[in-house]
């Protein structure tokens, strides 16, 4: 059975903390490096229901994509939800490890998992990492479908490949337009429109698209947009990270149990269709 510091070494190799954005907060949040680890739970968000799941299952380590303390703090008092999360974890001997933008840019990383989930063959990064001589790391991914298909069919493919959320999948573009080359970016991706347009793809799959950037992208090109929930576009990475950890465990001869949380921690809980007629 490995100890926590063994697993930290694995994750540091897969997702080096030094490759995280300067504003990010990644790595070990709490946990004893000398503690034995038998069970590892993966989740997108370090929120109380996920922590409660870790406690009930008997996890020794919780690995999340989103940080608990992104902007720092001066207290971990249990008077707020973040402090309660930390107290629950420590009281139950559970470590918390975050891999955020260092997992976004990894090879393979968050966008590779998104591309796999929607059936794309990855051809390279959307925004290459200039420090990677192999040209594989970077933000987002470019990919191709096995064969061109109408935008409506591709949107249905995305909806089927990602976990269900109240938002569902929004699409902008001619439903009958044939789609073949596609850019994807797990999480918020409307800051990369320049790179998307320069890549010459037919469609862009991401999350959190705002009105003005999306409108400008549609007006200046024939680019189709497919907008899914932030949580849903990043959830596939959990399966990828789980596979990577289990491969490392097999290599080292470690005995580990792993689980990917099925809890939907997307904050939106209800979608109400609007009448087709103007009020």
Image (spheres, rainbow, N blue to C red):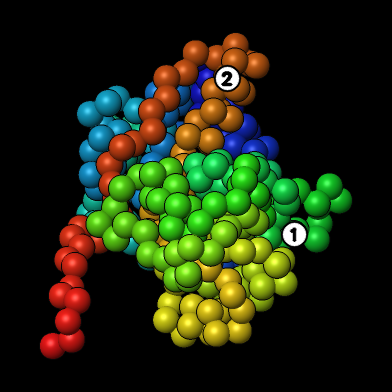
Name the N-terminal-most of marks 2 and 1. 1
Which residue is more in the foreground, 178 or 198? 178
Residue located at (18% from left, 73% from top): 274
| Quarter of the picture holding the C terminus | bottom left
In the picture, the disc for residue 128 is 1
Q: Residue furthest front?
A: 176
Q: Residues within 10 Å of mark 1 (few under 14, many from 20)?
A: some
Which x, y percent locates residue 196? 65, 68
Q: Secondary structure at mark 2?
A: helix
Provide residue 188's location: percent of width, then percent of height: 48, 65
Q: Work out whether 95 lies above or below 142.
A: above
Q: Which residue is mark 2?
A: 249
SS of the residue at dot 1?
A: strand
Tell me if residue 268 can be seen. Answer: yes
Proximity of marks 2 and 1: CB atoms separated by less than 8 Å: no
| Total marks in image | 2
Determine the residue located farthest toward the bottom in the rendered image.
Answer: 279
Name the residue rendered at 48%, 71% in the picture.
173
Q: Is residue 62 left or right of residue 140?
A: left
Q: Residue at x 56, y 79 (%)?
A: 217
- Dot in front, 2 or 1: 1
Residue 51's spot in the image, x, y percent?
28, 41
Residue at the spot 32% in from the left edge and 57% down from the top edge: 168
Cα distance, mark 2 to mark 1?
A: 30 Å
- Position above or below: 18 against 217: above
Q: Nearer the viewer, residue 229 or 73?
A: 229
Give 107 or 277, whichever is nearer the viewer: 277
Instruction: Check the image and report above or below for 57 versus 12.
Output: above
Q: Does residue 63 appear in this view?
A: no
Q: Residue furthest right?
A: 133
């Amino acid at each position: 059975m490995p100890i926590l510091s063994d697993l930290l070494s694995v994750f540091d190799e897969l997702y080096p903390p030094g490759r995280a954005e300067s504003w990010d907060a990644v790595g070990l949040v709490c946990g004893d490096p000398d503690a034995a680890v038998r069970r590892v739970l993966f989740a997108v968000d370090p929120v109380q229901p996920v922590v409660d799941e870790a406690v009930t299952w008997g996890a020794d380590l919780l690995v999340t994509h989103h940080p608990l303390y992104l902007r720092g703090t001066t207290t971990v008092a249990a008077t707020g939800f973040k402090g309660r999360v930390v107290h629950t974890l420590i009281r139950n001997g559970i470590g918390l490890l975050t891999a955020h933008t260092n997992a976004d840019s990894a090879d393979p990383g968050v966008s590779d998992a998104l591309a796999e989930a929607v059936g794309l063959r990855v051809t390279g990064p959307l925004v290459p990492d200039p420090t990677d001589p192999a040209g594989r790391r970077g933000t987002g991914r470019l990919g191709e479908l096995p064969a061109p298909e109408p935008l409506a069919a591709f949107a249905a493919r995305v909806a089927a490949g990602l976990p269900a959320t109240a938002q569902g999948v929004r699409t902008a573009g001619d439903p009958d337009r044939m789609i073949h080359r596609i850019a994807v970016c797990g999480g918020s991706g409307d800051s990369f429109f320049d790179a998307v347009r320069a890549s010459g793809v037919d469609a862009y799959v991401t999350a959190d698209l705002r009105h003005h950037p999306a409108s400008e992208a549609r007006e200046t090109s024939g680019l189709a947009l497919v907008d899914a929930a932030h949580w849903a576009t990043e959830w596939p990475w959990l399966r990828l990270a789980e596979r990577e950890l289990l491969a490392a465990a097999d290599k080292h001869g470690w005995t580990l149990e792993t689980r990917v949380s099925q809890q939907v921690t997307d904050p939106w809980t209800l979608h109400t269709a609007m009448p087709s007629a103007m009020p």
